[in-house]
Amino acid sequence: MKKLHFIEVEGNTKGFVTFLGLFGLISLIGILSAYYMEHNGHWVTGMNNQVIWGTPHVFAIFLIVAASGALNVASISSVFAKTTYKPLARLSGMLSIALLSGGLVVLLLDLGRPDRLIVAMTEFNFVSIFTWNIFLYTGFMGVVGIYLWTMMDRPYNNLTKKAGLAAFIWRLILTTGTGSIFGFLISREAYDAALLAPMFIIMSFSFGMAFFLLVLMGSYKYTQRELGDYIVNRLKNLLGVFVAAVLYFVIVYHVTNLYSADHRDVTIFILAGGGIYTFLFWVVQVMMGSILPLVLLYGPAGNKRNMISLAAVLIILGGLAQLYVIIIGGQAYPMQLFPGMEVSSSFYDGVVASYAPSLPELLLGLGGIGVTLLLVTIAVAAMKFLPISLSDEIANPHWN
Amino acid sequence: MTINIDDKNNENQVEESSRRNFIFGSVAAAGLTIAPGVMLYQTAGARSLSDFSLSEKASSNVRWGMLVDTTKQVDWNKCVEACNKEHGLNNETHSRDDQKTQYIRVVNVKNKGTGYSMSLPVMCQHCENAPCVDVCPTGASMKRADGIVLVDRHRCIGCRYCMMACPYKARSFVHEVLTDQTENTPRGKGCVESCNMCVNRIDNGQLPACVEASEGAIIFGDLNDPQSDISQLLAKHGSRQIRADLKLNPGVHYQGI
Ligand code: SF4
Ligand code: SF4
């Protein structure tokens, strides 16, 4: 294995400036959309008093979940001592911070009163899992930041393993915390405390890896650096395993819920009678977002970069659909004020709530992805995150 | 039927809730009239009005509650109207119907098997173990010492987690800029709100608006006082709470459901 060289991406090229401008624009549009919704009030959105968290939350939770998953590669390298992944550990850590930042921006901008951020940062109710998440998120950035530092500053290299372990543990807690936001809601039948948190962890592996692969392949392609098949194929095989694991967990989750009296009705709603949610579940999440990517990744053309990219994009879309079904489908299903009875009121009790995402909500969500990519673009140019080459000669420890 | 709130055990409660009560700009009350001539509680006569800190009304000795008798033939919409008037609701100009605030609503329940149907008013149930209070990251969603659950709208960041957590769908989000508000119930775009048991009226010694409009079908009183009307009725006839299985112990009880 040849020696590894990290070097910043040249910032003074047309390609770089184009990406900077593109991601900056997407972020800006997202922020302007948030301003528009904030200025008018949420009546301009599809949200209402039943579907309380809309499309921005789908994107925010997706990005936060993916953030923890993006750290996988670094964890495998530092915690499980797999040297193959060491060249990618820096990118992995940095991407996880960028994803988390993108998610948090969306979460913050969708608050009814984002101007009261200071209240959220100073007045804490420690019974609330939300409060704990605020600490988990900020702490994650700190821990991963230190981890990156130990990797990039030679005198501290010997601390990398410990920092990596800390970051690994932290990310597991973080995703559990994110899943628990929903898991603890006794009010909503769709959310099952016991299964949601582990499912979020598995989902994070898959979404985070898909994002990581796209960023990796994209940045090497557009900087004309060499990226060998050795590393890409290992990652895509791992991605396939994660996708299959999510699918398996989704099956277990729904089958278990079908047998539980408390969750049966809402499960049948999602699987069979839920209109758009049923469609998103079967067609987008299961077919397009899980089965098709598996076929692409393990099929005859599975080593082709285009196929891998397509699979990763589909996995991300499937992931967004999955969260849409969980978050919005779970809210649209009526609350059971009088279980077993037919209920109606002027407040839309007993009916499936209608929700259609509005354009500004969608743009805010996409803005979160824009912020993430903007941060990645700036970071790779500002610091030594990317090895100058990841050709098989360099990346494969068994090369001779 | 009096209860003494001038109680030493109360001292530590005072500290905790004084700030909270301040928010509502309440004034000390001397007593609560539930019917002409009948006082629900009385403050200790030995002290002058100015001796009372603002918080002492929110005593942990008291737990305000309601008993709704759904067997009485009343038009529950009158309660809704009274509530809307009291709190200046229904003044949205842009919001869709599913975005408008409702503190109290009439819910129609029908048993598909037997065909039996009934109506009942549902508002915030002022749960003892209120999930909306537990989940609120900033403590804006809170329970007063006297059991009233409400939102401090100066602290609410509009995250809406409390709405996700409430099993009674009792809360609304203010979806637009509101003008034309009543003095007692400040409401603001981007914040969550819900029935506050007319805390402004209670602290002034009046009954909640819906109770007043209910023609006696809703009884209001202190659940902690075994001598109060509500406690006596509960002891005698029993009651049910909506979704009692969730073990939140709502302060709103029902008969006939
Ligand atoms: S009914 Fe809902 S809003 Fe009211 S106290 Fe209970 S959980 Fe909170
Ligand atoms: S919306 Fe307001 S009251 Fe409700 S949980 Fe969030 S901060 Fe608390």
Image (cartoon, rainbow, N blue to C red):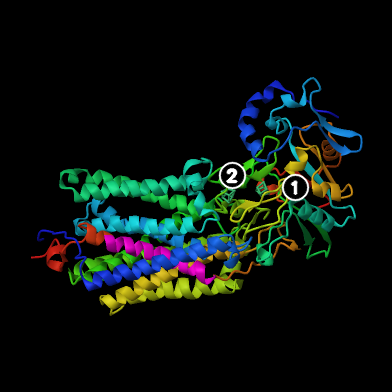
Q: Which residues are magenta?
A: A358-378
Residue closer to the observer: A247 or B247: B247
Quarter location, residue A273: bottom right
Q: Is mark 2 within 8 Å of ligand 2?
A: yes
Question: Residue A237, position in %: x, y?
Answer: 29, 67
Question: Residue A246, position in %: x, y?
Answer: 42, 63
Q: Seen in the image, is A175 located left or right of residue A265?
A: left
Q: Is residue A364 magenta?
A: yes
Residue B5, visible in the rendered structure: no
Q: Is residue B253 above or below residue A110?
A: above
Amino acid type, label 2 = Ala
Q: Which mark is residue B241?
A: 1
Question: Residue A161, position in %: x, y?
Answer: 24, 46
Question: Circle 2 sits on which residue?
Answer: B140
Q: Seen in the image, is B46 located left or right of residue A97?
A: right
The N terminus of chain A lies in which quarter of the figure?
Answer: bottom left
* Same-chain status of marks 2 and 1: yes
Residue at the extreme left of the image, as rendered:
A400
Query: At numbered mark 1, what does the secondary structure look like: helix, strand or loop?
Result: loop
Q: Chain of mark 2?
A: B
Q: Seen in the image, is B150 located left or right of residue A250?
A: right
